[in-house]
């Protein structure tokens, strides 16, 4: 069991984590026709916008209440109301997701109460669903903000019921912030292979998958339709992908009596087998479809091929807890050694289950030092880790958010049988690409006498 260690230094060098409001905004973008609204100063939204645009290479409809000195002191309720009105006039969204920032949270503003009063008074806002999540920057990271936003969505839009009327062919997929659009698509493919219909929430595979739309819109293009969210109460089961989704799954279970299963990781043979067994039970099929069995067989072959490179490999990883746990446990199962693990939030039980002695709650400066001490051979983190990779002369596998110095981050898939196979290939190929310069002393040979060191090598024939 890993022990969480908090880094103690006065300043953060090369920060690892992205803020909770940014995670909430990203979750809101998984709703069709939505506009995320950050309640804070303009700079809070500007920095978040830069990260989202550089990662996805897409236009992102992120708005702000633009609090100033006066509203910071007296309260920003008027700014919230004005922002909702302006967004509705310009973009005509179906959904507005509000996330607080440190500016509003430090003041102690009752945003939830003010929003209830605004919506009760402004009946012209009824056509737009408005949801609020408290996401201060100083508490947790991106996956915490994402989790709070999804919990706020299901609390507001999934109806409470005392009678079950389940659709036996529908399952709800609660997707964590660590899943890329391509990974959500892979989950949907696997669920449909068993004859089941998934209800995905939030669904970035429809809104931020990188597609050219025929029409311009000031809202998200694609995602989970607002009207379909209520149907989560009729699903036969809720499948939460990532420990961060446990809270939202419990809310649906309490409100609509829908049983839930949580899958902390879906990378590697054993975790995916557990997911497939769950689909077999729900669909009533005695064995997986041929396509799923074929994918499993190909993963097993990839494991045989890759274990020559992953066995004994010293890995340093820095990511949000769920992503760190999923990739770290998959590599440990292949014989790798996690010599450095750095994460962004202390609010996750999977940290204690990491296959290493300690997990550092810190930044990429801590990551670089821990990787150096552990004599790591490969680094796994997002694009800001390129500085550590340059300093340590090690290969860097870019995962998580943000990835801004490569294109196609939304198409990376390291989940399921197919994604696990691709992940093992990535690791093995990165190890093979390391330039090795063998020396005689590495093999126990006696170095040549000094007087012969000047003798040139014979010319090749």
Image (spheres, grey):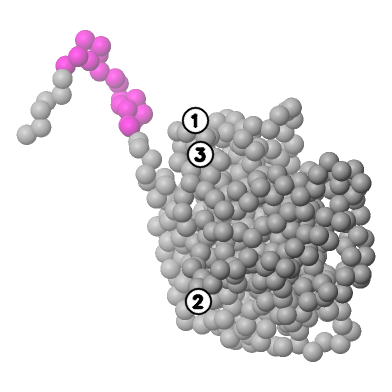
Q: Name the residue under label 2.
A: 292
The answer to whether 299 appears left or right of 105 in the picture is left
Quadrant of the rendered image containing residue 38? bottom right
Q: What is the crowding at mark 2: few (fewer than 14 residues within 10 Å), some, or many (at least 20)? A: some
- Residues 177 and 307: in front is 177
Is residue 253 in view?
Answer: no
The answer to whether 103 appears left or right of 228 in the picture is right
Quadrant of the rendered image containing residue 230? bottom right
On whether residue 449 falls in the magenta region, the answer is yes
On whether residue 223 falls in the magenta region, the answer is no
Q: Position of residue 267 (x, y in %)?
A: 57, 61
The answer to whether 370 appears left or right of 1 in the picture is left
Q: Mark 3 points at which residue?
A: 386
Magenta residue span: 437-455
- Residues 114 and 99: in front is 114
Is residue 396 in view?
Answer: yes
- Residues 432 and 147: in front is 147
Q: Position of residue 119 (x, y in %)?
A: 88, 69
Whichever of labels 2 and 3 marks the residue nearer the N terminus, that label is 2
Residue name at image x 48 percent, y 68 percent? 212
Whichever of labels 2 and 1 marks the residue nearer the N terminus, that label is 2
Residue name at image x 71 percent, y 29 percent? 11
Q: What is the crowding at mark 1: few (fewer than 14 residues within 10 Å), some, or many (at least 20)? A: few
Q: Position of residue 397 (x, y in %)?
A: 49, 47
Question: Which residue is the extreme one toward the top?
Answer: 451
Q: Distance between the residues labelled 2 and 1?
A: 42 Å
Residue name at image x 74 percent, y 30 percent? 8
Measured along the vertical axis of the image, is residue 29 above or below residue 102? below
Q: Mark 1 points at which residue?
A: 391
Q: Where is residue 342 in the image (x, y as percent from the top left)?
A: 65, 41
């Amino acid at each position: 069991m890993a022990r969480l260690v908090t880094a103690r230094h006065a300043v953060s060098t090369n920060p690892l984590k992205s803020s909770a409001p940014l995670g909430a905004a990203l979750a809101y973008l998984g709703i069709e026709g939505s506009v995320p609204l950050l309640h804070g100063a303009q700079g809070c939204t500007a920095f978040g916008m830069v990260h989202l645009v550089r990662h996805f290479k897409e236009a992102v409809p992120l708005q702000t209440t633009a609090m100033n000195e006066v509203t910071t002191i007296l309260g920003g309720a008027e700014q919230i109301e004005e922002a909702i009105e302006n967004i509705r006039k310009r973009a005509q969204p179906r959904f507005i997701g509000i996330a607080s920032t440190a500016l509003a949270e430090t003041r102690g503003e009752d945003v939830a109460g003010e929003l209830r009063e605004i919506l009760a008074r402004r009946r012209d806002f009824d056509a737009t669903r408005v949801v609020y999540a408290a996401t201060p920057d100083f508490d947790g990271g991106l996956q915490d903000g994402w989790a709070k936003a999804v919990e706020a969505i299901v609390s507001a839009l999934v109806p409470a019921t005392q009678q079950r009327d389940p659709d036996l062919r529908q399952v709800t997929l609660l997707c964590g912030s660590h899943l890329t659009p391509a990974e959500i698509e892979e989950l949907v493919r696997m669920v449909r292979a068993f004859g089941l219909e998934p209800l995905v929430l939030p669904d970035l595979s429809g809104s931020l998958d990188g597609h050219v739309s025929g029409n311009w819109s000031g809202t998200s293009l694609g995602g989970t339709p607002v009207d379909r969210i209520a149907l989560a109460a009729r699903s036969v089961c809720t499948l939460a992908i990532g420990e961060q989704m446990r809270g939202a799954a419990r809310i649906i279970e309490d409100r609509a009596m829908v049983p839930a299963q949580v899958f902390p990781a879906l990378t590697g043979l054993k975790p995916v087998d557990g997911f497939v067994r769950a689909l077999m039970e729900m669909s009533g099929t005695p064995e997986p479809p041929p396509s799923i069995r074929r994918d499993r067989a190909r993963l097993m072959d990839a494991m045989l091929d890759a274990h020559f490179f992953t066995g004994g490999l010293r890995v340093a990883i820095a990511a949000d807890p769920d992503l760190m746990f999923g990739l770290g446990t998959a590599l440990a199962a292949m014989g790798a050694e996690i010599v450095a693990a750095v994460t962004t939030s202390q609010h996750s039980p999977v940290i204690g289950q990491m296959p290493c002695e300690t997990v550092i709650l810190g930044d990429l400066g801590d990551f670089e030092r821990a990787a150096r001490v552990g004599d790591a051979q490969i680094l796994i983190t997002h694009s800001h880790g390129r500085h550590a990779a340059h300093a340590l002369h090690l290969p860097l596998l870019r995962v998580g958010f943000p990835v801004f110095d490569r294109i196609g981050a939304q198409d990376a898939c390291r989940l399921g049988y197919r994604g696990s196979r691709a992940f093992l290939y990535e690791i093995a190929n990165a190890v093979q690409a390391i330039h090795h310069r063998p020396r005689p002393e590495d093999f126990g040979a006696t170095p040549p006498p000094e007087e012969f060191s000047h003798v040139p090598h014979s010319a090749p024939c």
